[in-house]
Image (cartoon, rainbow, N blue to C red):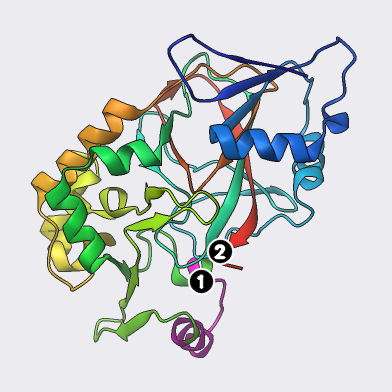
Amino acid sequence: MKTSRLTADESLPLLVTPAAPDEDIMSLDVSELRRLLRENGALLFRGYGIDSPARFSAFCARISDKLLDYTERSTPRSVVEGQVYTSTDYPADQHIPMHCEMAYSRKWPRIVWFYSHVAATEGGETPLCDARKVYARVPQSIRERFEKDGVMYVRNFRKGIGLPWQEVYGVKTQAELERYCTAHEIDFEWKPDGVLQTRARAQATIRHPETGEAVWFNQAHLFHFTSLPGPTRQALLSAFGEQGMPRNALYGDGTPIEASTIDEIHRVYREVEVAFPWERGDVAMVENMLVSHGRRPFKGERKTLVAMAESYPS
């Protein structure tokens, strides 16, 4: 294999291409790939002829022998096969903010793969962002408040709005839901109108377990109600008020996060993010505790598949 940079001034991702036309991606040294991932945060495999979900899944499984199910879901996805999913099933005109996968939870995948099965005719990039740089650039006063209190993620489950709680938590009955929440330290309340509200407190920053580096690791800006598209946000606020929004993020002590703080976090992400155009057959491997990702709006058909592995903490 050969390694290079997509552009001279961008560190993400490290481009990995065949050293010879017949080089098989399945022949690459796994230990070397893991070293490169740890050092660079993200690898982009291009030119290896990945042409099917099965081939993508086989490559992921060679790196890590147990792929993960998508649990505690926050967005809609469809199963393609096994533990391979579609990327977030949001409308093409919507932007998905930068985030580390499942940073709203107390467990998350160490590795996330993306496979471009069909590249959009325009847009649809999966921008990447070094979460260490985000940590360093978030203003100190904001960072200290988040590190002190953490983040509280609030969900209000109503029939016909967002994902049902059965799908999010992988349960069928109220009794199963209550056992799941108790086991995972998620507070829950059944409202008189039948709405289920859950409240989960999680970290805002972490230290990487191998390098010790500080990382910005939360989804406060994504869950916060101000991140919804304007018309949708106003309609939901009118119907349910701020406390009844389908999703919201608060400081860990339960006090509201200022809209100006969320705006500042978005600004930092925009400064740091790096984007590259997908080519059909590309596979990106991302170290989820070092690098966040998002999605830009697109035109035309786009089919990007996702797999995850190595739950942390184990």
Of residue 99 and residue 43, the one placed in the foreground of this image is: 43
SS class of the residue under badge 1? helix
- The quarter holding residue 248 reads bottom left
Of residue 194 and residue 220, the one placed in the foreground of this image is: 220
The stretch drawn in magenta includes residue 19: no
Query: Residue 272's spot in the image, x, y percent?
Result: 33, 28
User: Which residue has dot 2 on it?
Assistant: 71
Tell me the CA gap for discs 2 and 1. Answer: 7 Å
Give the residue type at disc 1.
Tyr
Picture disc at residue 218: none
Q: Is residue 132 above or below residue 274?
A: below
143 left or right of 19 in image: left
Q: Is residue 297 above or below residue 174?
A: above
**The N terminus, quarter of image:** top right
Of residue 197 and residue 6, the one placed in the foreground of this image is: 6
User: Which residue has dot 1 on it?
Assistant: 169
The stretch drawn in magenta includes residue 169: yes
Query: Residue 230's spot in the image, x, y percent?
Result: 17, 40
Badge 2 or badge 1: first in the primary sequence: 2
Q: Residues within 10 Å of mark 2 (few under 14, many from 20)?
A: some
184 left or right of 286 in image: left
SS class of the residue under badge 2? loop
Task: Report the magenta residues as a range.
Answer: 168-182
84 left or right of 55 in image: left
Of residue 92 and residue 55, the one placed in the foreground of this image is: 55
Query: Residue 125's spot in the image, x, y percent?
Result: 47, 24
